[in-house]
Amino acid sequence: MFNFIRRHQRLMQLVLLILILPSFVLIGVSGYSNYVSGDEDLVKVGDQAVTAQEFDMARRNQLNDLQRSMGGAFDPALVDTPAAKQQLLDSLVDRRVLIEIATKERFSVSDSALRQAIAAMPELQEDGVFSAQRYNQLLAGAGITTRDFEQSQRAELAISRVLAPIVDTATLPQIINDELQKVLMDSRTVQLHAFTAEQFLAEQSVTDEEIKAWYDANQDALRLPDYVNVDFLLLNEDAAVKNVASISEDDLQAYFDQNKARFTSPARINLSHILVLPGSDDSEHQAAQQLAKDLAAKAQANPADFAELAKTSSQDRGSAQSGGELGWITQGNWPEVLQNAVFALQKGEVSGVIEGPDGYHIFKANDFLPEQKQSFESVKAQITDEVRQQLAAERFADMATQLTNLVYENPENLNAAADALGLPIQTAQGVARDRLLNNAELGIDQQAFSTAALLEDPRVRRALYTAQSLEQQQNAGVIELASDSIVAVRVNQFVAAHVPSLDQLHDQVKKQLEQEKALAAAREAGKKQLAELQAGAQTSIEFSESLDVSRVDNQQIPKTTLDVLMSAEINQLPAFVGAESANGFHLVKIVGKDSSSPDPMIADFLQKQLQQLWGNAQEQVVMQALRDQLEVKQLPASEQAMSAELDAE
């Protein structure tokens, strides 16, 4: 049975999900509530509650699932935010609401509906048809009875019936559908001119007083989070290559002798040919032989006219048009009977008739390159690199083992590992829990190393912020970043959250103020130009080429600009509108508009999408009504849960 489970892991996961979860939440709620009666409630849902233990279990499962799917690239910080936690808690509450309503209203599922639902599961089908054998085999392999499985499915279907009728029957009114499609499909032909901050940057000046005032007013924005400065050792392919001892001349010569074939270029010949096909019976076969002999005699008598003869007489349609050219042929790549004959030819020589697998050939040698052997001295540098790379691969494995052992045997520093392996101890500043701080934030010109990417790896940051690293001040560990890249890290300084001094941030603040002033100047210039154009003035500014835009094809125009130009009242053309952009101001010249009906296929697609959105909106409204009916209330303990960290298992 265990072999079956190993071979069908995805199927087992599905069965466990659809069997255990519904039966637990619908059938076992009472028992579970009694079991955790001392647990803290986070959200009250009718007579039930979502508890802290239930929430922690869901968080742990979420983290485990993401870790399995994303591997080392997963960063727990992505889901360890108040917003992500609240979203998870809301999903648990919604699930509990549906269970409460389904239980209270005695929702049930007929045997026929249950059979149809199970038969429709792709995991239980073979060639698109439900397989009783596969069904029984799957459940038996998981140690689950059909009764338990079907009971769990009946419960799951009952829960789904709370909202399914709402979604299935929600109908988007035609008048709304028509208006939405019109709004989405109406198009404008526009030309753009951008006023950007960069255009006004050189004109800006900032005083020390302004810098000080901005610094004082933006303390919260300038505050840096807790971060650590670190020491690290990087073991990669380059380090392993440097660690390889010098290679003797004898070893290089032995490698060359073992790989001589790689350093030998076989002979090559450039050929043209005339082909005569053999025929289907003896008489045709003899006639083909005679024709080939006649053509060979002609070609040998006048080799210069070989190409013309091939064009008129060769039965190889692929090469005849090009005068029989076959190009360069490498020795060893042809059937032996042909190869021996053609490589016996001299340059410019025409062969006699040569019988091959596909007929009778007459060859002409257009050019010839003899076998070329590279000398040991000419490839010595290449051989040295290859041998060094091979030895480095072996050395890397040994160094990785040594690095791991030495880092853990000498937890107080990285010196022992660095000395034993000849690796330099590198340093880096500003490794926060969620990111690597940039040079401007730290007030430094640049880091003294070029491998910042390794410190962006979530596994490295997690290792640096363990109790072993921060509290016990030991080496944080050895992390395998890739098959050929390993890093050992250690915290050399912990820096608490703080606002850097004005001296550190002076240049950064100056650039920020200059950028803000330039942005304001760009927007002011854009608005001034827009007002003049709307008043009827002429302009010499250049606009872009015309673009046809709509809400479903925005041509990469920012949403704020698109909203303005699509909602503008157009009494005459051209019309001018404008909108602030992230980098300045967009001036838009509207030169055309189109309100024609969309293509039927596009209209049908839009209608389906709008219908789905309408159904989702209806579902959300009903879900909120059900929450209100059960008087769902988020309790004070939930605030603590939003900021709490999971206990290590």
Image (cartoon, grey):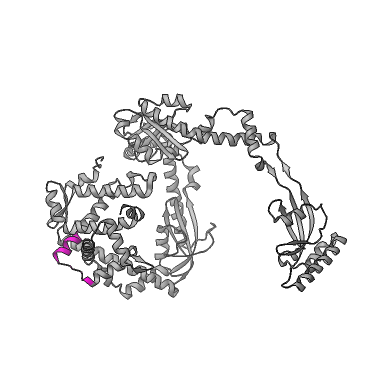
Toward the right, the furthest residue is 301
Q: How many marks?
A: 0
Is the N terminus in the top left, top right, bottom left or bottom right quadrant?
A: bottom left
In the rendered image, which quarter is residue 173 located in? bottom left
Q: Looking at the picture, tell me which residue is in the foreground, 240 or 352.
A: 352
Toward the front, the furthest residue is 282
Residue at 55%, 36% (x, y): give it. 390
Q: Looking at the picture, tell me which residue is in the foreground, 274 or 37.
A: 274
Residue 103 place in picture, x, y as percent? 15, 63
- 577 displayed left or right of 463: right
Q: Is residue 110 magenta?
A: yes
- 541 displayed left or right of 158: right
Residue at 54%, 61% (x, y): give it. 545
- 67 displayed left or right of 251: left
Say whether residue 597 is visible.
Answer: no
Vertical relation: 246 (above or below) 71: above
Q: Looking at the picture, tell me which residue is in the foreground, 506 or 414.
A: 414
Residue 351 place in picture, x, y as percent? 81, 58
In the rendered image, which quarter is residue 263 located in? top right
Q: Main secondary structure of the magenta part?
A: helix
Say whether residue 358 is visible.
Answer: yes
In the rendered image, which quarter is residue 77 located in? top left
Is the C terminus in the top left, top right, bottom left or bottom right quadrant?
A: top left
Q: Is residue 36 magenta?
A: no
Residue 30 place in picture, x, y as percent? 13, 55
Residue 386 place in picture, x, y as percent? 59, 37
Q: Which residues are magenta?
A: 97-111
- 574 displayed left or right of 436: right
Q: Looking at the picture, tell me which residue is in the foreground, 524 or 306.
A: 306
